[in-house]
Amino acid sequence: VQLQASGGGLVQAGGSLRLSCAASGRRYMIGWFRQAPGKEREFVGGISWSGSSTNYADSVKGRFILSRDNAKNTVYLQMNSLKPEDTAVYYCAAKRLDVLTVTPDNYDYWGQGTQVTVSA
């Protein structure tokens, strides 16, 4: 499975970005994680294969929205009301078992990451 994350960039605080994760192959549960310099990788949100189930980290709940278009094998992470503390490299990951989980070790495949920088 290959995962291609894209859509990162530089945005001012309060702005929005939409990240995309294009996946090849079969259906997977997709999770998004982020890692800031000097910090551990942290869970951002996850979406089931059907798109009917999602979960979010408390830090992004109400601001970030996950969706997916299975016809395009793409998952989207809409990020609104961005804050400087959202600055990180964002990674998407795929999991064969369609159960939402926040633990990075439970994911089977990882994309290369896309940088998101939010200026104050």
Image: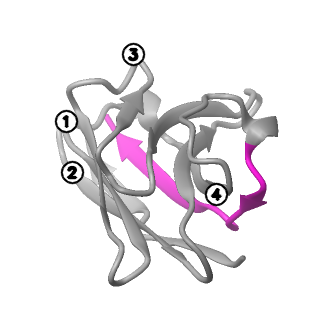
* For residue 26, above or below residue 45: below
Cα–Cα gap, marks 4 and 1: 26 Å
Residue 47: percent from left, percent from top: 42, 46
Query: Badge 3 is on which residue?
Result: 58
Lower position in the chain sequence, tag 2 or tag 4: 2
Residue 108: percent from left, percent from top: 78, 55
Q: Is residue 117 magenta?
A: yes
Query: Badge 1 is on which residue?
Result: 81
Q: Residues within 10 Å of mark 3 (few under 14, many from 20)?
A: few
Colour convention of the picture: one colour
Displayed quadrant of residue 94: bottom right
Lower position in the chain sequence, tag 3 or tag 4: 3
Residue 13: percent from left, percent from top: 25, 38
| Range shown magenta | 107-120
Q: Is residue 115 magenta?
A: yes
* Image disc number at residue 16: 2
Are the residues flagged by discs 4 and 1 in contact, CB closer than 8 Å?
no
Please tell me which residue lies in front, 50 or 90: 50
**The disc labelled 1 sits on which kind of residue?**
Ser
